[in-house]
Image: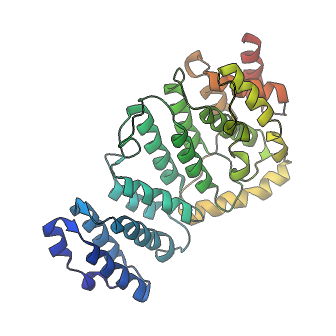
Amino acid sequence: MAVLSAVSIAEIKARGSIKDADVLKVRRSYYDDGIITAEEAEAIFALNDACPVQDPAWADCFIETITDYLVEQAEPRGYLTAENAQWLIERIGKDGRVDSKTELELLGNVLDKARWAPQSLVRFALEQVRDAVLDGTGPLRSGKKLEPGVVSEADVDLLRRILYSFGGDGNIAVTRAEAEVLFDINDATAEADNHPAWTDLFVKAIANCVMAASGYAAPPREIALARDAWLDRRGDLSLDGMLGNMASGLKGLFAGYSEQTGEERAIARPTQQKIEIVTHEAVTAAEAAWLAERIGKDGKITPTERALLAFLKAESPSIDPALRQLVDKATAAA
């Protein structure tokens, strides 16, 4: 890609605007050879940062070219390393926050396109949703009248999309890093009028951790975390009503999990090791002891945690003793 010769970077930065003609030139040079160098990727970011006025076509061009550079051009192709993920975070995450809708969409697109990405980037993406929910600021809240501290249906859809992206090619259970962000959101919005889809996703994601920590093989995330049909039906949206709907919707949840022998767990381990080797970053599982401590932190069990524990009690899967003790204690006190 000859972007450095196709457009005058200095001229565009000086005028502070990207015109449709500039976008056409960048696209033409991109399609000519299909190659984006590190220097060119830096130049594209420099244009995006320096120009507050941008032709509507620029967003798609920016997202497409940077995604292609990170996922298809940088080695190993098709994957994202921790180093490349950090490169992206440093450019879009000033003070840990993504400020523009275009850069947030870039983050999501990179995660969607990469076969595997480091959990640090997935956690960073989840934190953008968390911060938008808790503070009511940022590109996810721009132009929307949403009360801070409340999880909307759109928030849940984005959280699910991010969680799907880390699943990649293997049946990787929800990690501790991911679960920590979900617990943060849950703790902070425990008394809020959240969309029912939040309870559905939270229960499924943490149940996924529980089952993996108890020695079960997890199904693909698209199955384990899939949105239930009951959410699209009108009905009783009280807490008891939602729990009843969830109970019917989650009846088959554990059917996708299979208990593993020690030998089977050893055989499954290479999949995670492969991800760690390719991304240059360890994948931290949510261990049973940590989950038992994290659920009901500070002695307070939230409504969504209570829904999780009640369901585990009713379905009675063979779970780790530390978690079984928590389930029995919580349901006895209910």
Task: Tell me where residue 50 appears, x and y as whole percent.
Answer: 21, 62
Residue located farthest toward the bottom when viewing the structure as drawn: 32
Q: Nearer the viewer, residue 320 or 38?
A: 38
In the rendered image, the vertical position of residue 297 relative to residue 27, given as above or below: above
Task: Tell me where residue 111 appears, x and y as whole percent.
Answer: 52, 59
What's the residue at 74%, 31% (across, down)? 246
Image position of 177 (left or right of 94): right
Task: Tell me where residue 314 appears, x and y as whole percent.
Answer: 83, 25
Residue 157 visible in the displayed image: yes
Quarter of the rendering occupied by the N terminus: bottom left
Image position of 266 (left or right of 242): right
In the rendered image, the vertical position of residue 53 relative to residue 242, given as above or below: below
Image quadrant where residue 78 sits: bottom right
Residue located farthest toward the top when viewing the structure as drawn: 333
Residue 287 visible in the displayed image: no
Quarter of the rendering occupied by the C terminus: top right
Image position of 11 (left or right of 31): left
Image quadrant where residue 251 sits: top right
Image position of 103 (left or right of 170): left
What's the residue at 53%, 24% (across, down)? 193
Task: Tell me where residue 43 appears, x and y as whole percent.
Answer: 28, 72
What's the residue at 75%, 17% (across, down)? 331
Residue located farthest toward the front when viewing the structure as drawn: 234
In the rendered image, the vertical position of residue 45 relative to residue 158, given as above or below: below
What's the residue at 19%, 72% (across, down)? 12
